[in-house]
Image (cartoon, helix red, strand yellow):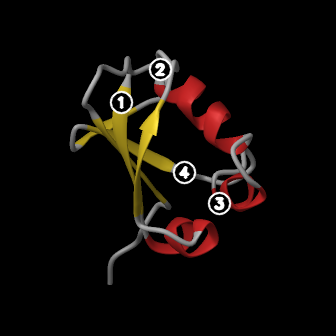
Amino acid sequence: MKITVKYFASIREAIGQGSELRDTSAATLAALRDELLAASPAHAAGLARGKSVRMALNQVMSDESALLSDGCEVAFFPPVTGG
């Protein structure tokens, strides 16, 4: 399936791009994250399992068990604090 993946803040800086279209066979956000971790050293650095990463599926905050569908939009971003 084809999906849009967006990266924000420090994750975007680590990966070196703000978004990408991907072909994936991942069924869940967890499987997609694992796929991206293996995609490149930059992806591995930005999305490392030891890092706190928030995820949204179609602009709704989601956990790693969320199911992906063709044409969906996934966003990865670090937790943010306001002030």
Q: Earlier in the sequence, mark 2 or mark 4?
A: 2
Disc 1 packing (10 Å; few <14; some 14–19; many ≥20): some
Q: Amino acid at mark 4?
A: Val
User: What element does badge 2 sit on?
Assistant: loop
- Above or below 11: residue 37: above
Residue at horizontal 21 percent and vertical 44 percent from the top? 59
Q: Earlier in the sequence, mark 2 or mark 3?
A: 2
Q: Which residue is mark 3?
A: 46
Q: Amino acid at mark 1?
A: Lys
Q: Quadrant of residue 14?
A: bottom right
Residue at horizontal 22 percent and vertical 37 percent from the top? 58
Q: Which residue is mark 1?
A: 2
Q: Earlier in the sequence, mark 1 or mark 2?
A: 1
Image coords of residue 82 (percent x, y): 33, 77
Checking the image for residue 28, the label placed there is 2
Quarter containing the C terminus: bottom left
| Front position among marks 2 and 4 | 2
| Front position among marks 1 and 4 | 1
Tell me how far mark 1 sits from mark 3, CA to CA. Answer: 22 Å
Image coords of residue 55 (percent x, y): 42, 44
Q: Earlier in the sequence, mark 1 or mark 3?
A: 1
Disc 2 packing (10 Å; few <14; some 14–19; many ≥20): some
Residue at horizontal 78 percent and vertical 57 percent from the top? 41
Q: Amino acid at mark 3?
A: Gly
